[in-house]
């Protein structure tokens, strides 16, 4: 079972209140102390597009050793910046929809795959033991183009695998999918890609994320992305709500008898400083419950 915590990246990229780098660094440490081993910490994207993550290099220099960290890379410039920092895990991100990738990275899906092929080769040359994740956003539906043909998502995912990425994360970017369609797409993906190379990335905009985890778990998926306190969204996906909250995911898995190694109280507390910096309060259900239970003791 792998949980990929994306709170410091997906959780913060949509927030306009600047979060100081030290607060981000403490957030990553607290997530690791809670038992999360894989953490997507930031993005080497254009600071003009995503000002919140403009401190990527400073953050990496500040992080304490421990977690397996990864970063988003959109282009050659991003790769160069990441390699200067000695990054060993990168995530290349495209989508099943041209309308979305145009707005998100200013490329068509085809252009992005061509660019990524070169980036993957350069990264492998620089970091032979490195790890590459590929994201396929808008896997079920695009906020601009509507429903996506499942064959389109499968074709982008298989092309990423063919260029040598270690895994593909399938994104319900705007949190619209429900279990029947999740199962349908997962089955098609599994016909082409082994389960160990697939992760699911659900946003919980409409409260279907846990049901979608259960549906894809049943089919053999064992890697899920989530964000502490359900922070998150995508600035270039109108209507993208928060990510599946890590607290809700861990509670669900543990209660189902699937060990995660994560301490639920420590996890519930891990995002509190970030939330207060943003002027927010916890909204993830299992987080609220864990904090309430602890305050009664
Ligand atoms: P562009 O404007 O087309 O870039 O943006 P450009 O190549 O034309 O360059 C313009 C300027 O930006 C130049 O500077 C470049 O040097 C600079 P100037 O000469 O004007 O001074 N530049 C950069 N600076 C720093 N780092 C870079 C970089 N690249 C160019 N990497 C670009 C193209 C890809 C850069 C832009 O569109 C971008 O940064 N997009 C990122 C958007 C983003 O982060 N979206 C959120 C992540 S995706 C997501 O959330 C979905 C996911 O969670 C899964 C799911 O939920 O489905 C992963
Ligand atoms: Mg996302």
Image (tube, rainbow, N blue to C red):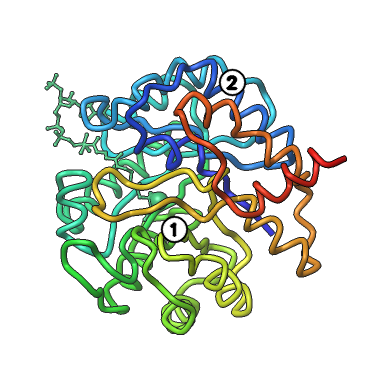
| Residue 54 in the image, given as x and y percentages of width and height | 34, 22
Instruction: Identify the residue at image location x=51%, y=65%.
Output: 209
Q: Quadrant of the N terminus?
A: bottom right
Furthest residue to the right? 297
Q: Secondary structure at mark 2?
A: loop
**Left or right: 208 with respect to 67?**
left
Furthest residue to the front? 296
Instruction: Identify the residue at image location x=69%, y=41%.
Output: 267
Residue at numbered disc 1: 203
- Residue labelled 1 has its Cβ within 8 Å of some atom of ligand 1: yes
Within 10 Å of the Cα at label 2, are there few (<14), some (14-19), or many (20+) other Cα atoms?
Answer: some
- Res 185 → quadrant: bottom left
Looking at marks 1 and 2 on the same chain, the residue that comes earlier in the sequence is marked by 2
Q: Quadrant of the C terminus?
A: top right
- Residue labelled 2 has its Cβ within 8 Å of some atom of ligand 1: no
Instruction: Identify the residue at image location x=42%, y=63%.
Output: 170
Instruction: Identify the residue at image location x=51%, y=48%.
Output: 230
Q: How many marks?
A: 2
Q: Secondary structure at mark 1?
A: loop
Looking at the picture, does residue 16 appear above or below residue 256? above
Residue at numbered disc 2: 63
Q: Which mark is residue 148?
A: none
| Residue 211 in the image, given as x and y percentages of width and height | 55, 73
Looking at the picture, does residue 121 appear above or below residue 110? above
What is the C-alpha distance between the residues marked 1 and 2? 27 Å
**Left or right: 37 with respect to 261?**
left
Looking at the picture, does residue 121 appear above or below residue 158? above
Residues 296 and 9: in front is: 296
């Amino acid at each position: 079972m792998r949980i990929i915590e994306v709170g410091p990246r997906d959780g913060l990229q949509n927030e306009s209140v600047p979060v100081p780098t030290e607060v981000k660094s403490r957030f990553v440490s607290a997530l690791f102390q809670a038992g999360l081993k894989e953490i997507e910490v930031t993005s080497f994207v254009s600071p003009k597009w995503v000002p919140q993550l403009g401190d990527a290099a400073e953050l990496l220099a500040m992080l304490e050793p421990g977690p397996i960290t990864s970063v988003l890379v959109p282009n050659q410039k991003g790769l160069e910046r990441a390699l200067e920092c000695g990054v060993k895990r990168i995530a290349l991100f495209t989508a099943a929809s041209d309308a979305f990738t145009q707005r998100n990275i200013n490329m068509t899906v085809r252009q992005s795959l061509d660019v990524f092929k070169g980036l993957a080769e350069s990264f492998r040359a620089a970091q032979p033991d490195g790890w590459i994740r590929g994201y396929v956003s808008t896997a079920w539906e695009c906020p601009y183009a509507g429903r996506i043909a499942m064959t389109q998502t499968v074709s982008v995912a298989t092309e990423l695998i063919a260029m040598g990425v270690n895994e593909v994360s399938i994104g319900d970017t705007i949190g619209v999918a429900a279990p029947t369609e999740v199962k349908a797409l997962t089955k098609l993906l599994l016909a082409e890609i082994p389960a160990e190379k697939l992760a699911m990335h659900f946003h919980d905009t409409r409260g279907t994320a846990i049901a979608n985890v259960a549906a894809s778990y049943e089919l053999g998926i064992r890697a899920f992305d989530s964000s502490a306190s359900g922070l998150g969204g995508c600035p270039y996906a109108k209507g993208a709500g928060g990510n599946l909250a890590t607290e809700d995911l861990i509670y669900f898995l543990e209660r189902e008898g699937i060990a995660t190694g994560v301490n639920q109280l420590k996890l519930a507390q891990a995002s509190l400083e970030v939330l207060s910096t943003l002027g927010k309060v916890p909204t993830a259900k299992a987080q609220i419950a864990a904090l309430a239970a602890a305050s009664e003791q």
